[in-house]
Amino acid sequence: MKPIALVTGASSGIGKAIAKQIADHYHLIICGRRTSRLEALSKELNNKTQTLIGSFDVRDQSAVSHFIDTLPDEWQNISILINNAGNAHGMSYIHEGDIQDWDAMIDINVKGLLYVSRAVIPKMIKKQHGHIINLGSIAGTDVYPRGNVYNASKFAVDALTKGMRMDLNTHGIKVSEIKPGLVKTEFSEVRFKGDLEKAKETYLGYHPLQAQDIAECIAFMLSRPKHVNIGDMIVLPLAQASSTLLNKQQK
């Protein structure tokens, strides 16, 4: 039987690309809020692997715990956890920030990652085996103007990854983080709250990363031998040198 991988935020973007990339090697628990998209993805993967849909919001701790605690017996043995669910809301100066935007970013990017990890990690400890990959961001190491709370949430992911790696070191569990730069997904549409023109401008004038690029890097992380743990990986488009330096003439 294939090992089992749980992917959060699998209904679109990087999460969906990850599920498709690793489907040949894992049975998949694909999680997200948009059930219809998860059902479509499950159907798409039907000829590659077995899938189980987890329809919940990572911000809802009771929903997360209930789903993990009531998994069918054949789905209990989770070997891989990919904490991909995350978002950015708005780009405001700190003194003009929307409190609801702040709550959404902290609740999903930080607390949601914690809720899912807290529910899954004891299963890994029980068998002294597993691999956790957290989706960070270059924003978690390199602050940029009007990024404030989003930056803070991704700095938290970086710190939590390092803390997890220390706490789980004696249990044979790998902990990794991948920090993408600019990736063309629905990310900017969400950040700019449906302003498609503004979102489109984010990716004009250069060749941004694609979700598939990040999925391939994660597949590489997962494919390393037992004694190898890629603790951290920064992945940028060629045109991007930092959070604030982007060559929009670089194709």
Image (cartoon, rainbow, N blue to C red):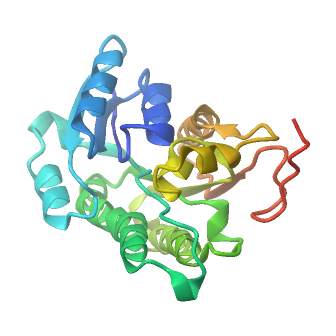
Quadrant of the image for the C terminus?
A: top right
User: Count the marks: how many?
Assistant: 0
Q: Is residue 1 visible?
A: no
Q: Is 221 located above or below residue 101 in the figure?
A: above
Q: Position of residue 173 (x, y in %)?
A: 43, 57
Quadrant of the image for the N terminus?
A: top left
Q: Residue furthest top?
A: 47
Q: Position of residue 56 (x, y in %)?
A: 21, 50
Q: Which residue sits at x=16%, y=60%?
A: 65
Q: Nearer the viewer, residue 82 or 191?
A: 191
Q: Which residue sits at x=57%, y=40%?
A: 225
Q: Position of residue 83 (x, y in %)?
A: 41, 53
Q: Is 244 located above or below residue 18 in the figure?
A: below
Q: Which residue sits at x=22%, y=32%?
A: 52
Q: Position of residue 100 (x, y in %)?
A: 36, 74
* Left or right of 176 in this view: 172: left
